Image (cartoon, helix red, strand yellow):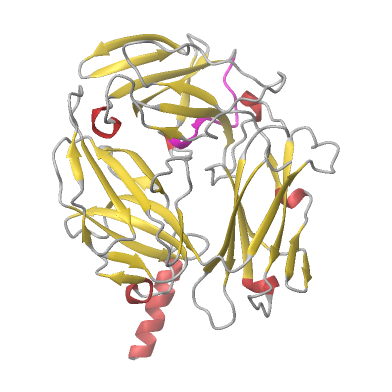
């Protein structure tokens, strides 16, 4: 029998941790939790990224459709570049008591269903991050820290390097019309890197998607105080198309995409006109939110508590169902994820894909995508078409873990737009 010493027990605990660690997603774990938003305070369409030690704050908000207050608390978890919990102890990455009561809430007013709107700003006097990197904010009821009602990612950067990205037309003639290539250079004259090939990892995200993210990208060329990423196929993204839009700011007056609005207690039901398959059509620029949404209402003043929830019925005609995969609704309205909630079902009688979502009044963007079975990445090309001219946002994250470091530092962040960059 092996005698368990304190050192051996610690080693076994760490092995168990790494074998069971999983990336923590953006997710609501209760069906009553809706409209989870996380962004920089005062900028609803921004990424949840703040500079360490700055006055920047992140606003996290959500609704609980149970309609009565709960004893919610929140805490933060430091993660590695792959969004798995890092090796840091709470005292090493969090200042304050990492269990804070969520006391900022308000009841809905004059809505068809009751809900409670919660929000918090972070960092605050009770809790703030001590180091850079990826973080997950967890909200849970009472003391059930291992059973969260939601988890939401955010990032804290040190900005120790300059990241210069560029969106280009690929040199590959076969892919030039449909793909966008992301090149970048990292300048680090004031930050020493002894082994950047192993110590630096770069991630690139298109809009808010994670399924097609390029991660753990290594530099192609290493120069004096300069890392060059000038790949060809390794940094290609499907250009896609401009996002479709949906205006739900009023349920008294129908916007041009709404076919009918009916009320079946306690919800209004919004039936949309059939969407059109755009693949094969010419590209036209449309100023959109790149898949995001904003909560707004036309007839009232406080959308956070006066906007109603409505069932929206989407449909996409197609003569026959696709085989070998699933059709999904893509965008922030489905949390950029491919789950049962985003999946569309084929109606053989009406010859169309259909799904219904419960959405809070606002202005939404969305697209349709095909996700092949057993693959992580989905494609919008079958329904939206794919154009290298399309307007997309790209987020570049630079992580560093040098010799002796035991967590991934976020040392550089940059954003680039495919249209304004050219």
Residue drawn at the location 37% of the way across and 83% of the way down: 10
Left or right: 333 as drawn, with respect to 113: right
Residue drawn at the location 79% of the way across and 71% of the way down: 223
Q: Is residue 4 visible?
A: no
The quadrant in which the N terminus is found is: bottom left
Q: Residue 252's quadrant in the figure?
A: top left
Q: Residue 249's quadrant in the figure?
A: top left
Residue drawn at the location 28% of the way across and 51% of the way down: 120
The quadrant in which the C terminus is found is: top right
Q: Nearer the viewer, residue 15 or 190?
A: 190
Left or right: 22 as drawn, with respect to 235: left
Residue 46 picture location, percent across and down: 48, 45
Residue 319 picture location, percent across and down: 59, 12
Q: Residue 195's quadrant in the figure?
A: bottom right
Q: Nearer the viewer, residue 215 or 229?
A: 229
Residue drawn at the location 67% of the way across and 26% of the way down: 385
14 vs 2: above or below: above
Q: Nearer the viewer, residue 2 or 92?
A: 92
The mark tally for this picture is: 0
Residue 179 picture location, percent across and down: 73, 38
33 vs 109: above or below: below
Residue 31 picture location, percent across and down: 28, 38
User: Is 39 a magenta residue?
Assistant: no
92 vs 322: above or below: below
Residue segment shown in magenta = 320-332
Left or right: 27 as drawn, with respect to 377: left
Q: Is residue 178 visible?
A: yes
User: Is 330 a magenta residue?
Assistant: yes
């Amino acid at each position: 029998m092996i005698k368990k010493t304190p050192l051996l027990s610690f080693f076994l605990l760490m092995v168990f941790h790494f074998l069971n660690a999983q990336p923590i997603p953006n997710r609501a774990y209760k069906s009553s939790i809706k409209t989870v938003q996380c962004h920089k305070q005062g900028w609803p369409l921004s990424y949840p990224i703040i500079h360490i030690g700055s006055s920047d704050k992140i606003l996290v908000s959500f609704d609980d459709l149970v309609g009565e207050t709960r004893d919610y608390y929140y805490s933060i978890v430091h993660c590695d570049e792959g969004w798995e919990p890092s090796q840091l102890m709470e005292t090493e990455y969090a200042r304050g008591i990492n269990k804070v009561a969520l006391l900022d809430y308000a009841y809905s007013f004059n809505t068809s269903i009751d809900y409670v709107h919660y929000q918090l700003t972070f960092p605050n006097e009770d809790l703030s991050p001590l180091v850079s990197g990826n973080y997950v904010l967890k909200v849970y009821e009472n003391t059930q820290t291992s059973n969260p009602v939601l988890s939401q990612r955010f990032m804290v950067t040190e900005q120790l390097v300059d990241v210069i990205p560029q969106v280009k037309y690929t040199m590959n003639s076969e892919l030039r019309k449909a793909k966008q290539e992301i090149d970048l250079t990292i300048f680090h004259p004031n930050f020493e890197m002894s082994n950047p090939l192993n110590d630096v990892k770069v991630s690139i995200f298109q809009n808010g998607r994670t399924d097609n993210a390029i991660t753990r990208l290594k530099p192609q060329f290493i120069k004096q105080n300069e890392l060059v990423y000038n790949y060809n196929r390794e940094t290609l993204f499907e250009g896609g198309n401009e996002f479709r839009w949906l205006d739900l700011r009023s349920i008294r007056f129908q916007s041009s995409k709404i076919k009918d609005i009916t009320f079946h207690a306690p919800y209004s039901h919004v039936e949309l006109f059939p969407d059109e398959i755009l693949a094969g059509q010419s590209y036209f620029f449309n100023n959109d939110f790149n898949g995001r949404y904003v909560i707004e209402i036309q007839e009232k003043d406080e959308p956070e508590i006066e906007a109603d929830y409505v069932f929206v019925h989407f449909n996409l005609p197609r003569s026959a169902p696709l085989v070998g995969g699933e059709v999904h609704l893509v965008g922030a309205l489905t949390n950029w994820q491919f789950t049962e909630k985003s999946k569309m079902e084929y109606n053989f009688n009406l010859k169309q894909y259909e799904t219904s979502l419960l959405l809070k009044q606002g202005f939404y963007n969305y697209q349709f995508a095909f996700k092949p079975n057993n693959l992580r990445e989905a494609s919008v090309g079958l329904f939206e078409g794919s154009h290298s001219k399309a307007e997309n946002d790209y987020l570049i994250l630079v992580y560093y873990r040098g010799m002796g470091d035991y967590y991934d530092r976020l040392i550089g962040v940059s954003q680039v737009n495919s249209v304004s960059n050219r």
